[in-house]
């Protein structure tokens, strides 16, 4: 078959991989599964997660810990039925064109892993097991706190009672849990074993390019709670003229935002929490960051520079529509894939941002000060926006966003400086710059 090209290179047309999560509850499995899916879809790899807990909740929405006792025959039957349904749906999804399916469950016994392997491999699908092991009590407690406040199993329940019940659930799983290849009889499996959030990693029988890329991403992933802050530069002189690209400095109002930004960061981050600041190499982002506290380490990344508009750099949208009407229309029709003459597309920006995403996943708290297209791509990664949606996301100037990844999604908080700025958001077919805020005030 002909190879297909996507965000991470070229791979055979028939590549299909099932990633099977393994581990006790509160070890970050769902968090890892969601992050892997998000990363792959962001890079245009068809990926989906099949969470067995979601299938189980259809018949047992709020089970107590006793439901997970291996001596509970009815609970065992319902959990097995949920696993069967999840795997069946995943196999149907693969037949419809899926490339990487993630089975999110404990899969904590050798018998369950053998059953999954035989069922999936019989369809010609590669299987890689990913186990998250952890004996760090502080991290386990952090995950328990996250689960009791975000898991659908404990919706509306008293948090302390939920935590006690969840602890008992874990103890029930511990009675039968077997780590992958613990007895030396699963050496034929392809697996990645992550110990204590990546302090140790064991890899066995990784076989091809896409498996290697998935494993490399997961090796750089950590499951400690942390946040990412996103901000565009302060309003620039070219923003005032409605011109795109360029390397202009910030306007008077942009300077007001640069002076206000330390207060917004302090409000959101706190005064004692360490923070690293990343900017692009362009004047307007560096100027916006210059009043931040000196103890924040600042790094400049070429990969965070604005989308290259090629021959249209420095032009207004009206000038582009007049000089290159076919290009202007083509970009509106497929903004994600349209590449400026001599410049870039949104897809190109995503590809050059991959090292940034990899570094974000392995880092603690980061503040990124960058540009509209770049912020859109990073925001789309965390908030799982589609390729059709991401190029049109309003990202207003003089606004700080805080993104906090969780096991069941990403929390978004907005901090507005309340300093006026032009709106650089443009609807399809429009050529005007706006003095008013973007639709609904932006994100």
Image (tube, rainbow, N blue to C red):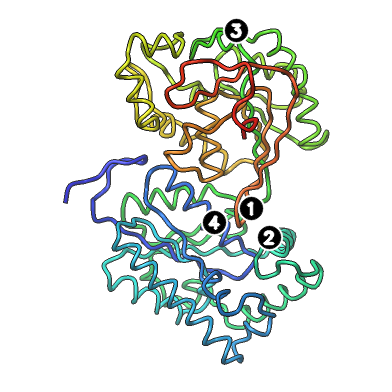
In the structure shown, which secondary structural element does the residue marked by tag 4 occupy? helix
Specify the label residue 150 is tagged with: 2
Name the N-terminal-most of marks 3 and 2: 2
CA distance for labels 3 and 1: 38 Å
Left or right: residue 322 versus residue 192 is left
Quarter location, residue 310: top left
Mark 2 crowd level (few <14, some 14–19, many ≥20, 10 Å Cα): some
Q: Return the residue nearer the eye: 254 or 118.
A: 254
Specify the label residue 237 is tagged with: 3
Name the N-terminal-most of marks 3 and 1: 3
Question: Given contact means CB atoms under 8 Å apart, are the residues at marks 1 and 2 in contact?
Answer: yes
The quadrant in which the C terminus is found is top right
- The location of residue 214, given as percent across then percent down, is 42, 51
Name the N-terminal-most of marks 4 and 2: 4
Mark 4 crowd level (few <14, some 14–19, many ≥20, 10 Å Cα): many
What residue sits 59% from the left and 87% below the top?
70
Left or right: residue 11 versus residue 435 is left
Specify the label residue 406 is tagged with: 1
Residue found farthest to the left: 1
Question: Given contact means CB atoms under 8 Å apart, are the residues at marks 3 and 1 in contact?
Answer: no
In the structure shown, which secondary structural element does the residue marked by tag 2 occupy? helix
Q: Which residue is mark 4?
A: 32
CA distance for labels 4 and 2: 16 Å
In the structure shown, which secondary structural element does the residue marked by tag 3 occupy? helix
- The location of residue 248, given as percent across then percent down, is 56, 8
């Amino acid at each position: 078959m002909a190879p297909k090209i996507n965000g991470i290179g070229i791979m055979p047309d028939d590549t299909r991989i099932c990633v099977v999560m393994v581990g006790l509850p509160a070890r970050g499995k769902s968090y890892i599964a969601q992050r892997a899916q998000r990363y792959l879809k962001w890079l245009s790899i068809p990926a989906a997660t099949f969470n067995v807990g979601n299938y189980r909740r259809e018949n047992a929405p709020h089970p107590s810990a006793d439901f997970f006792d291996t001596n509970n025959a009815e609970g065992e039957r319902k959990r097995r039925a949920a696993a069967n349904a999840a795997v069946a749906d995943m196999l149907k999804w693969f037949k419809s064109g899926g490339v990487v399916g993630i089975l999110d469950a404990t899969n904590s016994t050798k018998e369950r892993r053998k059953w999954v392997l035989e069922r999936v491999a019989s369809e010609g699908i590669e299987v890689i097991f990913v186990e998250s092991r952890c004996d760090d009590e502080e991290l386990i407690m952090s995950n328990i706190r996250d689960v009791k406040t975000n898991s659908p199993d404990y919706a509306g329940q008293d948090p302390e009672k939920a935590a006690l019940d969840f602890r008992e659930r874990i103890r029930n799983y511990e009675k039968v849990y077997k780590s992958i290849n613990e007895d030396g009889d699963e050496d034929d499996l392809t697996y990645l074993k992550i110990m204590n959030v990546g302090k140790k990693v064991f890899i066995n029988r990784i076989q091809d390019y896409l498996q290697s890329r998935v494993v490399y991403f997961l090796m750089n992933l950590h499951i400690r709670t942390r946040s990412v802050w996103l901000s565009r530069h302060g309003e620039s002189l070219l923003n005032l003229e409605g011109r795109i690209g360029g390397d202009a400095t910030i306007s008077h109002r942009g300077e007001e935002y640069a002076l206000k930004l330390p207060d917004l960061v302090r409000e959101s981050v706190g005064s004692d929490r360490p923070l690293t600041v990343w900017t692009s190499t362009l004047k307007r982002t560096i100027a916006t960051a210059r009043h931040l506290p000196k103890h924040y380490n600042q790094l400049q990344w070429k990969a965070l520079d604005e989308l290259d508009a090629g021959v249209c750099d420095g032009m207004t949208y009206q000038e582009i529509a007049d000089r290159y009407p076919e290009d202007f229309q083509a970009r509106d029709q497929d903004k994600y894939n349209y590449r400026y003459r001599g410049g870039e597309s949104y897809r190109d920006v995503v590809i050059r941002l991959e090292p940034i995403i990899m570094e974000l996943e392995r880092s603690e708290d980061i503040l990124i000060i960058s540009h509209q297209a770049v912020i859109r791509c990073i925001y789309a990664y965390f908030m799982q926006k589609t390729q059709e949606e991401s190029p049109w996301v309003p990202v207003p100037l003089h606004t700080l966003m805080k993104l906090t990844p969780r096991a069941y999604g990403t929390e978004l908080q907005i901090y507005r400086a309340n300093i006026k700025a032009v709106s650089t958001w443009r609807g399809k077919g429009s050529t005007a710059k706006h003095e008013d805020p973007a639709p609904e005030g932006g994100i």
